[in-house]
Amino acid sequence: MLVKPSEHAPATAEILRQIIKEAFPEEYVAVVTGGPEVASVFSALPFDHILFTGSERVGKLVMKAAAENLTPVTLELGGKSPALVHESYPMAIAADRVCSAKFWNAGQTCIAPDYVLVPLNKAEEFVGKCKTVLSKRYPNAASNVDYTHLISQAAWERMRDLAEDARNKGARVLQVDSNSDVPAQDRFFPPTFILDANNSIRVMQEEIFGPILPVVTYSSLENALCFINDRPRPLALYYFDRNKSRIEKVLEQTVSGGAAINDCIFHFVQHQLPFGGVGSSGMGAYHGFDGFCAFSKKKGVLIQNSFVGSFLDRALKPPYTSWSDRTIAFLVGQSKARPVQKMTLSGK
């Protein structure tokens, strides 16, 4: 097995390499490090199976390279995972659980809620509860060791550009605990909400992968489901409700790689559940037994019985006789053999 960690976290990649080197002989498991050029060569090797987790853009490149060797792939690609809050659900609880999942690691997880759908008449209440949650979870976020800074300067600049794009296109941008004194080089980006989000802004068109949460309002549950279903299939879907029939309706009328009810992210750590995407959020599944299956190949093996083999030699191989016809009729469940229909072809 070969493992290629992301080049965007070189220190983590090196630690992973050292741990695996100490735990396994290199002929069993090895870690290779490097940039995109290494990843390109890596994905073009004739492996038995490739598992890739990352962006949809890179996933397409991996799949294209693997196709040259007919290598099967498991792709886990993230995407825009929605959180949907029913109007009957307590906004304080929903806000805490959505914000906790969204702002862990500053939103840099593939299953973070990418946007949240809340009832039109509950939007301000929800945002207010979010502000309360953030003041509790991450007070003085700029200097709080529990709040993660972004992984690279490019990631920070992308978040800045996403917020500026939303502001320029008429959306309201609310930044909680913003600190303009923090230099950009520190890569601190405050928890940010995009209100009055519309389809023209970038945060509604691409996976955010950062601490920005668009808040989208809806007028009815049907309207919210149409909003979700009009978009590419998400890796995860989160629904907050205590009504069993509505929960079943949401699960039946949406398609996602996985789902969690009345919480976010925690389905990921249940190793008895398969984890993976669907459509543009990926293909295949792993974790637990499903991970074993993903990296295994079922091989059917027949060891022929001497008596059965002799019987089949006589019954199913030419020259065919009436006894052959009766045997075949018995095997396919007919009481007697049908007469053989002879057909001749003629042409003009």
Image: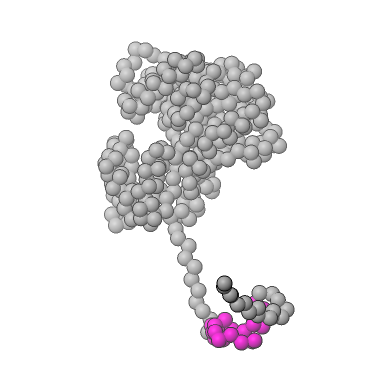
Residue found at the very far top of the displayed protein: 181
> Residue 33 is drawn in which quadrant?
top left
> Residue 157 is drawn in which quadrant?
top left
> Residue 216 is drawn in which quadrant?
top right
Identify the residue at horizontal 40%, vertical 43% (top origin).
Answer: 60
Identify the residue at horizontal 50%, vertical 19% (top origin).
Answer: 194
Direction from residue 217 to residue 79 in the image, left or right: left
Q: Main secondary structure of the magenta part?
A: helix
- Quarter of the rendering occupied by the N terminus: bottom left
**Of 89 and 67, which appears nearest the observer?**
67
Q: Residue 241 colored magenta? A: no
- Quarter of the rendering occupied by the C terminus: bottom right
Residue 229, x across and y down, in percent:
58, 35
Identify the residue at horizontal 52%, vertical 27% (top origin).
Answer: 115
Direction from residue 308 to residue 139 in the image, left or right: left
Direction from residue 60 to residue 12 in the image, left or right: left
Residue 225, x across and y down, in percent:
62, 32
Q: Residue 317 colored magenta? A: yes
| Residue 225 showing in the rendered view | yes
Residues rendered magenta in the picture = 307-331
